[in-house]
């Protein structure tokens, strides 16, 4: 899985390990868990190299969770094309690289599970986050298309768009004043709390389970009932 060193990705890795899976993580800053590899998801050669090591250690990859991501808050008129490209590159092109790199293993196995972590901002948009919302909306579209294309191979592809989850990424955005008042955000959330990384991990664990084999192309919002 990607982005496994922090926040949501770390919680997913922990949950999948607890469920008995052997989990390898790919992250810019991998941390010191077992099978943690350093690679940038935008760098296909680095992903392929990490996957070579992962396959040597653990065998073919039949489950992929794409959780690596980055935000960037800027007024649209202040965005440079480089800003735009960077956000698309990490959040959308990174998913392209990782999915394309592992699909052959899943096709060969006749079984696979892909879960993409998108964003609840895709439901209604988000000011100052246009490239991020565009990239994450692309991830949702990619999810649906791949589900149709690879269903016949026993591979399911689903997305989890999280909303307002207490992670280092969200706290950094809060500190920089981009999220407004956290208490007000909680008040606007029907279940009246922030999300926990474990909430996202639980949805991923379901999609990855054997029982979820008839569930594909779905975008499962885990957001406490918020629509943004
Ligand atoms: P985080 O910042 O705590 O974790 C993101 C991880 O991705 C970090 O370990 C980081 O090193 C890694 N990463 C970033 N760029 C990378 C790259 N180019 N290559 C490899 N690894 C890279 O953030 P958080 O909140 O845990 O986010 C996880 C995912 O959930 C992201 O895709 C994010 O966009 C998404 N998300 C989070 C929400 C929230 O409320 N926290 C809301 C909506 C979506």
Image (cartoon, rainbow, N blue to C red):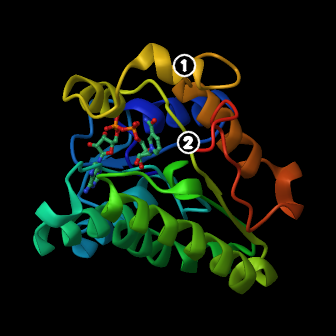
Asked if the beta carbon under badge 2 is closer than 8 A to the nearest atom of ligand 1, the reply is yes
Where's residue 75, x and y in %? 20, 55
- Horizontal side, residue 186 vs residue 206: left or right: left
Residue 5 lies, with reference to residue 66, above or below; the image says above
Residue 186 got which mark?
1
Residue 86 lies, with reference to residue 16, above or below; the image says below
Instruction: Name the residue at 38% across, 34% down.
Output: 34
Q: Nearer the viewer, residue 178 or 109?
A: 178
Instruction: Name the residue at 32% across, 64% down.
Output: 131
Instruction: Name the residue at 75% across, 75% down.
Output: 110
Residue 162 got which mark?
2
Residue 227 lies, with reference to residue 51, above or below; the image says above
Label 1, label 2: how many angstroms apart (C-alpha)? 15 Å
Name the quadrant containing residue 124.
bottom right
Where's residue 66, x and y in %? 48, 55
Which of label 1 and label 2 is nearer to you?
1
Res. 205 visible in picture: yes
Q: Nearer the viewer, residue 153 or 81?
A: 81
Residue 135 lies, with reference to residue 161, above or below; the image says below
Instruction: Name the residue at 62% across, 26% down.
Output: 189
In contact (CB < 8 Å): disc 1 and disc 2? no
Residue 177 got which mark?
none
Where's residue 191, x and y in %? 70, 20
């Amino acid at each position: 899985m990607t982005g496994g060193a922090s926040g949501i990705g770390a919680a997913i890795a922990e949950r999948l390990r607890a469920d008995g899976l052997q989990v390898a993580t790919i992250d810019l800053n991998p941390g010191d868990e077992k099978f943690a590899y350093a690679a940038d998801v935008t760098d296909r050669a680095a992903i392929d190299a990490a996957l070579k090591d992962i396959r040597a250690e653990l065998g073919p990859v039949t489950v992929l969770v794409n959780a690596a991501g980055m935000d960037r808050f800027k007024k649209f008129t202040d965005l440079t094309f480089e800003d735009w490209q960077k956000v698309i590159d990490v959040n959308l092109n990174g998913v392209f690289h990782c999915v394309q790199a592992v699909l052959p293993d899943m096709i060969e196995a006749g079984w696979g599970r892909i879960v993409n972590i998108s964003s609840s901002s895709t439901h209604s948009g988000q000011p100052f986050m246009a490239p991020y919302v565009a990239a994450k909306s692309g991830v949702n579209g990619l999810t649906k298309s791949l589900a149709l294309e690879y269903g016949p191979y026993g591979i399911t592809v689903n997305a989890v768009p999280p909303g307002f989850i207490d992670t280092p990424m969200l706290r950094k955005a809060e500190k920089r004043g981009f999220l407004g008042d956290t208490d007000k955000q909680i008040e606007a959330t029907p279940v009246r709390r922030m999300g926990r990384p474990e909430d996202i991990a639980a949805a991923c664990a379901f999609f990855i389970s054997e029982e979820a084999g008839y569930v594909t192309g779905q975008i499962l919002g885990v957001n406490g009932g918020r629509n943004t």
